[in-house]
Image (cartoon, rainbow, N blue to C red):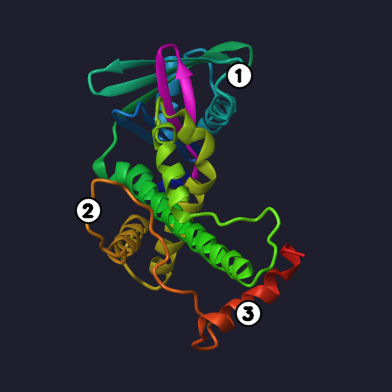
Amino acid sequence: MEELEQGLLMQPWAWVQLAENSLLAKVYITRQGYALLVSDLQQVWHEQVDTSVISQRAKELNKRLTAPPEAFLCHLDDLLRPLLKDASCPGTATFSCDHVEEALILRVRSELSGLPFYWNFHCILASPSLVSQHLIRPLMGMSLALQCQVRDLTTLLHMKDLEIQDYQESGTSCGVFHLFVLNDFIYLFLAKLPEACSVGDGRPFATNLQSMYMAVTRQAIQVGQKHHDAGDPETSSSAFSHRTDNQLLNQVEEPVSSTPSLPGPETEPTVSSGPMQRPQLLKVKRKKLRGLFS
């Protein structure tokens, strides 16, 4: 079961439209069973079963079919893969879902060996720890990574402004290059927030951010594996929790203001070899960028 848990964590989310239901889903199937996670952005449902449950449910739903559980698992994988890859082309199978009290029943209808094949995924509400492992903490990690990227970009913009300003003050023509005021960058960023933060039915998240999501979850598993190999009883989830919490605590606390702002550079860039005055620093940077303005 540990393989299923880790395998599911490594899977990307996919956006699925079933009738009027817009869902985010991820699944991991092996010869030993499957793990499925589904969310409508209001609740999260989960099912994880082994081969014994597969055999029992197959007998109940497909009395005319006789096959080992591995065959049913392979067929389910073939049915779900097209649906999660491209919701507009779900393949030959028919999918539907029903809400039964607090559970979600995902129904599948297709054919196997020329006979009708039926399957029901019985998903119950996911535990808070599972929601944290698959959504809350990965999203926190992605936010921290993007914040770091923005900080690096704003620092780079500030350094370029200093270089261009130095050229202008020395009388060198900068051609089409001009100072890019950092405040303009912040203003443009804030102006795009309403559009950028439009979660909608979850499709933008499933379409645009899964590479980063998988990178963050892969890192969580690697950290957990290192703790495990070192004899640390921490699981990958707790290791990821510890790592993310440390990153949050290390963020510089700033006064809360009514106007959001991006972190900007606070100090002049320095060279690792030792202290350097600004004229010397700009001279070094001028040599590196001479080709840009020639």
Q: Main secondary structure of the magenta part?
A: strand
Q: Which residue matches tag 1?
A: 89
Tag 1 secondary structure: loop
Q: CA distance from mark 2 to mark 1?
A: 47 Å
Report crowding for label 2: few under 14, some 14 to 19, many 20 or more residues within 10 A (C-alpha): few
Q: Which residues are magenta?
A: 10-26
Q: CA distance from mark 1 to mark 3?
A: 59 Å
Q: CA distance from mark 3 to mark 2?
A: 38 Å
The x and y percentages for residue 276 are 52, 86
| Amino acid type, mark 1 | Cys
In percent of the image, x 40 and y 42: which residue is there?
A: 190
Quarter of the figure that contains the C terminus: bottom right
The x and y percentages for residue 166 are 59, 70
Is residue 42 in the magenta section?
Answer: no
Judge left or right: residue 103 versus residue 152.
left
The x and y percentages for residue 62 are 47, 15
Q: Which residue matches tag 2?
A: 256
Q: Which residue matches tag 3?
A: 283
| Amino acid type, mark 2 | Val
- Would you place residue 41 above or below residue 151 in this image? above
Tag 2 secondary structure: loop
| Amino acid type, mark 3 | Lys
- Would you place residue 210 above or below residue 244 in this image? above
Q: Visible in this render: residue 60?
A: no
Report crowding for label 1: few under 14, some 14 to 19, many 20 or more residues within 10 A (C-alpha): few
